[in-house]
Image: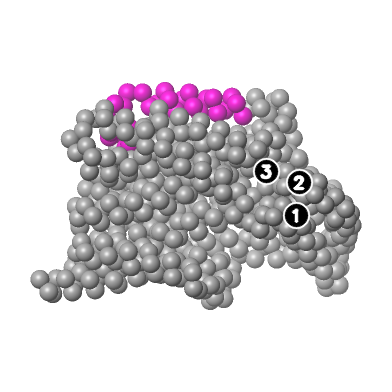
């Protein structure tokens, strides 16, 4: 990157860290450190809810997802508004009025300590894995920009953010979230502008979207009811509804956000704000991925976006690599010509032949890209290799003007820092309140609890860095983090459904129902082909059904 880009990156991040530490001063008790004294305004909490969920994964993983698969991923969010409305009626008033630090603390009040401990443990495992993926996303950026090894960048980002989180508190995290949301919106707007401005002179935005439509990148709705298909209207409205109910209603990283609000009503408003801004924002991010795809119709993209891996493969088999590069350039040129002819034919009434020519050329291009990807996998003996997460960062660095590159990189790194800080803070809160204070130091002083909370932050930060080393080649990062969560979220949601909505539910039913739910998800993932979003439905229903039966059997026998 240019000196000016680096200046923007370091100036912004230095300001974020300085201001975050400044805001953290004055809190010396657990309520201040973990819940900001329950004093934050609804709009700040709402932006923090969005920022904590978004992170760098949204910018990197979602744009790459759209580049490869088009707009279908938007269906994933269709259940979000309904989920937020349900939570505003149930979870927010329950948690806020209970005056708890963690969502799982409420379960001890409703059931027993054993149920609280088990649910908190599963949260720690799932979120510990998830934050590793969040660290992996910006590591992809820096490994490209600096030419560093990904392992080095993972620990630089992860541990530096861990140190900041240990010193700051949730108030600093929240106000950092507000700042990073502003810079992200500015950065995304500039990306859209520069992509459109750098299309060929005789290609309009409408023309570009016409090409994307022919390549099936603009398909947003799939009404087929297929449990094996990841993104359909049904998986978004039904399966993802369960995921969102669990994530925003049972996951400490989100519950902790609205527990910092000044009142129940402000907590509700913060969730509704996130509900109705998230889909338009996600649509914009997916559209950017599609526009990157269109941009590369007219300018040749890299055959493989992960330059490090393709260079390593080329060293091992230079002859095959050179042939693939030559074929790739030829096929791209044929696709470019076919795209231009397709656009020119829009002025006539007969587009069928040029459309079919373009579709055939694009299919040949995709076949060659798959062949190149397989070449890297086989040559480097890495069957998990996938470069979808490199698409957007490579595009930004190679094509955006000086200054804009720095702004986008700053936005991605700021998003990562903010989200990682929020996740680590929630992990430390659960570790401190659900385990240390509950079992080890029940009468511990505020100082002792804060000291343990900071040490727990360090431990979780190191654990997340280790997870991140395995995450970058698992595929689309936005899918990876939601897949991790789906193994746990549905069953955790089932426990809270029992707590909120089943008066006859008892502690044994909640505890063993959760275990049955986790086993059912493992069975579904191991012995069926259903898409991961449906794991949330399976886990929830099995947990509730088993919990209800066990509770009533135990009650009837007592």
Q: Are marks 1 and 2 in contact (CB under 8 Å)?
A: yes
**Mark 3 → mark 2, Cα distance in angstroms:** 20 Å
Q: Residue at x 48, y 68 (%)?
A: 525
- The residue pinned by badge 1 equals 379
Q: Is residue 271 visible?
A: no
Q: Is residue 512 above or below residue 428?
A: below
- The residue pinned by badge 3 equals 393
Question: Magenta-highlighted stretch: main secondary structure?
Answer: helix
Q: Residues within 10 Å of mark 3 (few under 14, many from 20)?
A: many
Q: Position of residue 17 (x, y in %)?
A: 49, 27
Q: Nearer the viewer, mark 1 or mark 3?
A: 1
Q: Position of residue 155 (x, y in %)?
A: 55, 36
Q: How is the image coloured?
A: one colour
Mark closer to the chain start, 3 or 2:
2
- The residue pinned by badge 2 equals 312
Q: Are marks 1 and 3 in contact (CB under 8 Å)?
A: no
Please name whichever residue, 46 or 108, is drawn nearer the observer in this view of the structure: 108
Q: Residue at x 26, y 53 (%)?
A: 116
* 331 on left or right of 484: right
Instruction: Specify the segment rendered in magenta.
Output: 9-37
* Residue 212 part of the magenta segment: no
**Mark 1 → mark 2, Cα distance in angstroms:** 8 Å
Q: Residue at x 80, y 55 (%)?
A: 297
Q: Position of residue 84 (x, y in %)?
A: 39, 56
Q: Is residue 541 visible?
A: yes
Residue sitting at the far left: 558
Q: Secondary structure at mark 2?
A: helix
Q: Secondary structure at mark 1?
A: helix
Say which quarter of the image contains residue 490: bottom left
* 312 on left or right of 526: right
Which part of the image, by quadrant, shows the N terminus? top right
Q: Nearer the viewer, mark 3 or mark 2?
A: 2
């Amino acid at each position: 990157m240019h000196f000016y880009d680096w200046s923007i990156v370091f100036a912004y991040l230095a300001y974020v860290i300085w201001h975050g530490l400044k805001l953290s001063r004055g809190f010396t008790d657990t309520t201040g450190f973990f819940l900001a004294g329950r004093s934050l305004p609804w709009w700040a909490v709402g932006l923090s809810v969005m920022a904590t969920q978004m992170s760098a994964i949204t910018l990197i993983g979602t744009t790459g997802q759209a580049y490869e698969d088009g707009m279908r991923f938007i269906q994933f969010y269709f259940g979000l508004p309904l989920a937020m409305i349900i939570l505003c009626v149930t979870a927010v008033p329950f948690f806020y009025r209970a005056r708890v630090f963690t969502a799982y603390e409420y379960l001890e009040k409703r059931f027993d300590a054993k149920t609280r401990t088990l649910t908190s443990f599963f949260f720690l495992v799932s979120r510990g894995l998830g934050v590793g993926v969040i660290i992996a996303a910006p590591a992809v950026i820096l490994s490209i920009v600096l030419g560093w090894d990904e392992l080095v960048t993972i620990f630089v980002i992860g541990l530096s953010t861990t140190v900041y989180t240990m010193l700051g508190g949730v108030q600093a995290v929240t106000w950092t979230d507000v700042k990073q949301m502003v810079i992200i919106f500015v950065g995304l707007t500039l990306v859209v502008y520069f992509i459109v401005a750098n299309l060929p002179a005789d290609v309009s935005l409408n023309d570009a979207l016409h090409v994307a439509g022919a390549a099936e990148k603009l398909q947003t709705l799939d009404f087929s009811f297929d449990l094996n298909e990841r993104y359909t209207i049904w998986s978004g409205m039904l399966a993802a509804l369960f995921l969102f109910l669990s994530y925003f209603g049972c996951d400490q990283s989100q519950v902790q956000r609205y527990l910092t609000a000044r009142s129940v009503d402000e907590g509700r408003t913060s969730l509704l704000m996130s509900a109705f801004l998230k889909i338009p924002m996600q649509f914009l991010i997916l559209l950017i991925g599609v526009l990157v795809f269109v941009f590369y119709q007219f300018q040749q993209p890299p055959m493989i976006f992960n330059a490090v891996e393709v260079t390593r493969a080329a060293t091992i088999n230079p002859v095959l690599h050179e042939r693939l590069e030559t074929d790739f350039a030829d096929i791209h040129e044929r696709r470019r010509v076919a795209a231009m002819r397709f656009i020119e034919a829009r002025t006539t009434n007969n587009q069928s032949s040029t459309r079919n020519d373009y579709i055939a050329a694009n299919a040949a291009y995709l076949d060659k890209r798959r062949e190149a990807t397989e070449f890297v996998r086989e040559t480097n003996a890495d069957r998990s290799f996938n470069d979808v997460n490199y698409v957007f960062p490579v595009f930004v660095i190679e094509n955006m003007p000086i200054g804009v590159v720095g702004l986008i990189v700053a936005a991605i790194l700021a998003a990562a820092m903010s989200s990682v800080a929020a996740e680590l803070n929630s992990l430390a809160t659960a570790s401190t309140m659900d385990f240390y204070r509950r079992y080890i130091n029940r009468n511990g002083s505020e100082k002792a609890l804060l000291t343990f909370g900071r040490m727990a932050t360090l431990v979780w930060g190191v654990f997340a860095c280790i997870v991140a080393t395995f995450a970058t080649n698992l595929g689309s990062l936005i899918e990876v983090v939601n897949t991790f969560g789906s193994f746990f979220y549905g069953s955790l949601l089932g426990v809270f459904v029992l707590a909120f909505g089943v008066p006859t539910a008892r502690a044994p039913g909640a505890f063993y129902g959760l275990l049955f739910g986790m086993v059912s998800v493992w069975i579904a993932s191991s012995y069926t082909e259903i898409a991961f979003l449906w794991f949330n439905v399976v886990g929830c229903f099995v947990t509730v059904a088993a919990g209800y039966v066990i509770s009533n059997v135990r009650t009837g026998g007592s």
